[in-house]
Amino acid sequence: MSETTQRLAALRAEMKREGLAAFIIPTSDFHDTEYVADYFAARRHFSGFTGSAGTLVVLADKAALWTDGRYFIQAEKELDGSGIDLMRMGQEDTPSILSYLETNLKPGETVGFDGRTVSFREAREWKRKLAAKGIELESGKDLVSRVWTDRPPMPKSETFVYPLEFAGKSVQEKLADVRKVMAEEGAKAHIITKIDEIIWLYNFRADDIPCFPAALSYALITPERASLYIDESRVDAGTKKQLADAGVELKPYDRIYEDADVLEGPVMIDPSFVNSRIAGSLPTQPLEMPDPIVMMKAVK
């Protein structure tokens, strides 16, 4: 038995214990990042496919991996002998992930995934389409951490200040710009999960991902306060002072879910970016719109 088939067998054992007929493992991390740190390379770990894009779907008796035309040849070689079928995206005879699930599952069966790795918009579409076929969706399942016993640690590179001469505006000025949009939209809070937007907003950098000078973190802004959710031990003195001067509070990385659970609405989120677990934690219907920071950081 190959290493990949052993890993899939362990995953299937957990699926059986949880009553899951299928489990979805995307490439993404908790922040919808295109290139992920090793900690989040679960799709690679369970499939053996090392390309930068792809989604693995595991059933009790079969598995399939979807990837695009850049990787057809590579994926075919790396999946050989794994028992995983290659789904060539964009080809006429290739079913979508949802069609594959609808064909292979029965009404009443459940599909699981880690809601932190799937955007709110995508998870909502999955739920809508699968529900029409009587298939249930469970987003609170982190089976990967249970099975991946030698998983690499979460990255914890030290932060450093991005100088004002390059940043263009201070943290205070950028917060004022975001709060202006929030006021115009009637939002009482704004949750940001894209790490490139967070380092832009708070004028710092880190080295969590090769060639991407960002830190895994979340941000929450209200008219009165601002927070950065990150392991405080990795925040250097200069960044701490800069954030403190701007009235930004440091909070533990995972505290975002607890804080989201008690936010007064409307809470502004970008449903294409914010993960479904955070959005699902909100006590009221979110205010969905493109994140204003996308356009702000495009101005040089």
Image: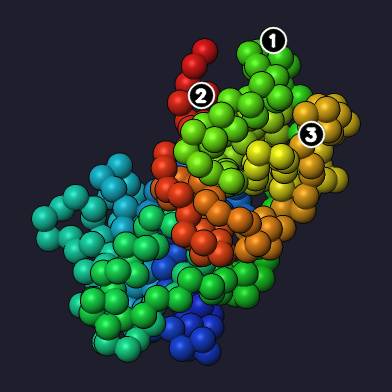
Name the residue nearer the viewer: 162 or 288. 288
For label 1, count other residues whose C-alpha is less than 10 Å away and answer few (under 14), some (14-19) or many (20+).
few
Determine contact: label 3, label 2, CB under 8 Å. no
Q: What percent of the width, then of the height, locates residue 175? A: 65, 29
Q: In this view, does 247 lie above or below 32?
A: above
In the visual, does 15 lie left or right of 73?
right
Q: What percent of the width, then of the height, locates residue 244? A: 83, 33
Residue identifier under label 2: 296
- Element under disc 3: loop
Name the residue nearer the viewer: 132 or 151. 132
In the visual, does 213 lie left or right of 106?
right
User: Cα distance, mark 2 to mark 1?
Assistant: 17 Å
Q: In which quarter of the image is residue 242?
A: top right
Q: Say if residue 36 shows up in the picture.
A: no
- Element under disc 1: helix
Residue identifier under label 3: 247
Q: In this view, does 121 lie above or below 60?
A: above
